[in-house]
Image (cartoon, grey):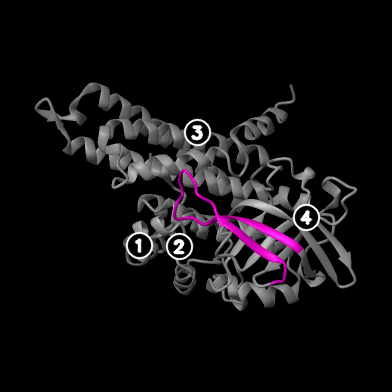
C-alpha cells in the first residue's frame, strides 16, 4: 500500500540525508563500533548539512520547521544503512532532547544553547535513570538543593545515551526531597562543571557504536539560570515529552524490521541449497510473507501516529501502543530473518547480526514493554 506520509520536500531531504550517510557514516561503521563511540565530528557535519535541529527557529541556526516527518526520514535512513546504533545519538539529540529546549528555555537560554545544538557543537543528553531507579521517576534519589543563585547537585545516573560525547545534560533531580513527583525539577548540567564526572562507557550486548555512560554529580554547583522551566514541574515536563520519545523509538523499530526484511530477501535469492535458491522454498516464502504483512500493517499505524504528533494530538496511550508493538515487531522480525541467513547470520560481517543484537534493548529503554502495556490497560477503563 502506498504511503502518503511524505511530500516532495521530505523525499528531497531523504535523498540528501542518504548521500550524507554514504559519505560520512557508512565508511566508519566498523571503526565506531569497535571504538564504542562515534566521532564528535559527525554531529558537526550533520549540523552543517541541516540534519540537526530542524525544528529550531531560523534565528538560532535551525531549520525553522516543526515537522516530525523529517525526523522520521532520518530514523528510517539510518536503519536502511545498517547504522542504527550510530543514528541513536543523533535521534536522541533531535527527537528526545530538543523538545525540552524548545518548549522550556527562556530567551536567554535559547540564545545560549540553541545555536550550538543546531550546529552540532553542543551535543545533548538526558539523564533520568539511576542505578536503583528505572521507570519509577518519583523515586529518583539525585538531589539539587538550592543555595543562593545555585543548586548543589548530588547523585548518579546510568545508561545515559550520549553520556560520553554530551556537552549539555538535562538532569532530573529532586529540588524538594520531601516530595515524590512534585519535587522533581530539570537542570542543564554543562561539560566541565566542577564535580561532574563521567564513569564507564558501558560495555553492552548491542548498540556498540553508541556511547552509553554512567554520570556522577558530587556537589556540582549548577546556576539557577540552568533550570529548565519551573522548579517542581520536572515530572510533568517529562510526561509531556515521553510520547514523542516513544514514537521515535517506534519509528526506528519498524525501520529496522523493514531493513532486515530487505536484506533477507536479497540473501535468500542468492543463497543456494539443494539446487535452488532458498527463497524458492515454501517455508521461506511464507515466513517472508508473514514478516512483510506485519511490517506493512505496523507502518501505516505508525504513519498515523506521526500525523497525530504533528497535529499535537498524539496521546500517551497511542504512543505506548506504537512503542510496544513496533519494538516487539522489531525483535521478532530480526530473529526470524537471522534464522534464514543460517550460520552466516551469526557473523557480525552481516548487518543482520548487528541488527539482532541492537534490537534487544528497544523493548526496554524509553519504557519497557510491560510499562507500555500498563499505560494502555489504564486507558481501557476496566
In the picture of the structure, the residue carrying the numbered disc 2 is: 38
Residue 73 shows in the view: no
Between marks 1 and 3 in the image, the one whose residue lies nearer the viewer: 1
Between marks 3 and 2 in the image, the one whose residue lies nearer the viewer: 2
Cβ atoms under marks 2 and 4 closer than 8 Å: no
Q: Earlier in the sequence, mark 3 or mark 2?
A: 2
The local secondary structure at tag 4 comes to strand
Q: Earlier in the sequence, mark 1 or mark 2?
A: 1
| 224 shown above or below 171 | below
In the picture of the structure, the residue carrying the numbered disc 4 is: 173
Alpha carbon of mark 1 to alpha carbon of mark 4: how far? Answer: 37 Å
Cβ atoms under marks 1 and 2 closer than 8 Å: yes
Q: Nearer the viewer, residue 253 or 5?
A: 253
Alpha carbon of mark 1 to alpha carbon of mark 3: how far? Answer: 29 Å
Alpha carbon of mark 3 to alpha carbon of mark 4: how far? Answer: 31 Å
Horizontal relation, residue 308 to residue 351: left or right: right
Q: Residues within 10 Å of mark 3 (few under 14, many from 20)?
A: many
Cβ atoms under marks 3 and 2 closer than 8 Å: no
Q: Earlier in the sequence, mark 2 or mark 4?
A: 2
Determine if the magenta segment contains residue 87. no
In the picture of the structure, the residue carrying the numbered disc 1 is: 28
Between marks 3 and 4 in the image, the one whose residue lies nearer the viewer: 4
- Please provide the residue range marked out in magenta: 193-218
Q: Earlier in the sequence, mark 3 or mark 4?
A: 4
> Residue 310, how many percent across, how many down?
59, 53
The structure residue drawn at horizontal position 75% and vertical position 45%, both measured from the top left corner, is: 137
In the picture of the structure, the residue carrying the numbered disc 3 is: 328
The structure residue drawn at horizontal position 60% and vertical position 64%, both measured from the top left corner, is: 124
Q: What count of labels does the image hold?
A: 4
Residue 316 shows in the view: yes
Amino acid at each position: 500500500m502506498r504511503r502518503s506520509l511524505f511530500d516532495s520536500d521530505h523525499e528531497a531531504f531523504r535523498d540528501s540525508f542518504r548521500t550524507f550517510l554514504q559519505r560520512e557514516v557508512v565508511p566508519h561503521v566498523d571503526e565506531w563500533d569497535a571504538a564504542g563511540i562515534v566521532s564528535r565530528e559527525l554531529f558537526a557535519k550533520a549540523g552543517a548539512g541541516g540534519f540537526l535541529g530542524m525544528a529550531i527557529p531560523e534565528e538560532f541556526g535551525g531549520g525553522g520547521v516543526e515537522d516530525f516527518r523529517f525526523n522520521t526520514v532520518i530514523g528510517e535512513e539510518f536503519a536502511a544503512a545498517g547504522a542504527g546504533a550510530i543514528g541513536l545519538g543523533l535521534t536522541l539529540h533531535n527527537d528526545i532532547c530538543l523538545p525540552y529546549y524548545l518548549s522550556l528555555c527562556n530567551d536567554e537560554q535559547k540564545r545560549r544553547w540553541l545555536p550550538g545544538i543546531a550546529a552540532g557543537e553542543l551535543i545533548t543528553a538526558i539523564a533520568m535513570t539511576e542505578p536503583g531507579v528505572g521507570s519509577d521517576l518519583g523515586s529518583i534519589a539525585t538531589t539539587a538543593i538550592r543555595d543562593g543563585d545555585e543548586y548543589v547537585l548530588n547523585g548518579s545516573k546510568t545508561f545515559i545515551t550520549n553520556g560520553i560525547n554530551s556537552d549539555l545534560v538535562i538532569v532530573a533531580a529532586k529540588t524538594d526531597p520531601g516530595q515524590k513527583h512534585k519535587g522533581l525539577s530539570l537542570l542543564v548540567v554543562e561539560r566541565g562543571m566542577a564535580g561532574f564526572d563521567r564513569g564507564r562507557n558501558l560495555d553492552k550486548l548491542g548498540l556498540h557504536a553508541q556511547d552509553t555512560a554512567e554520570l556522577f554529580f558530587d556537589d556540582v554547583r549548577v546556576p539557577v539560570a540552568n533550570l529548565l522551566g519551573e522548579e517542581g514541574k520536572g515530572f510533568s515536563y517529562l510526561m509531556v515529552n515521553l510520547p514523542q520519545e516513544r514514537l521515535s523509538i517506534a519509528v526506528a523499530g519498524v525501520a529496522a524490521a523493514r531493513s532486515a526484511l530487505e536484506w533477507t530477501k536479497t540473501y535468500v535469492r542468492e543463497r543456494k541449497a539443494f539446487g535452488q535458491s532458498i527463497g524458492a522454498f515454501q517455508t521461506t516464502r511464507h515466513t517472508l510473507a508473514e514478516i512483510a504483512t506485519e511490517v506493512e500493517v505496523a507502518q501505516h499505524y505508525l504513519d498515523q501516529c506521526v500525523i497525530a504528533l504533528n497535529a499535537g494530538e498524539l496521546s500517551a496511550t497511542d504512543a505506548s501502543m506504537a512503542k510496544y508493538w513496533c519494538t516487539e515487531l522489531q525483535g521478532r522480525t530480526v530473529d526470524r530473518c537471522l534464522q534464514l541467513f543460517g550460520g552466516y547470520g551469526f557473523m557480525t560481517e552481516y548487518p543482520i547480526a548487528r541488527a539482532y543484537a541492537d534490537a534487544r534493548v528497544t523493548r526496554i529503554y524509553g519504557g519497557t514493554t510491560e510499562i507500555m502495556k500498563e499505560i494502555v490497560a489504564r486507558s481501557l477503563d476496566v
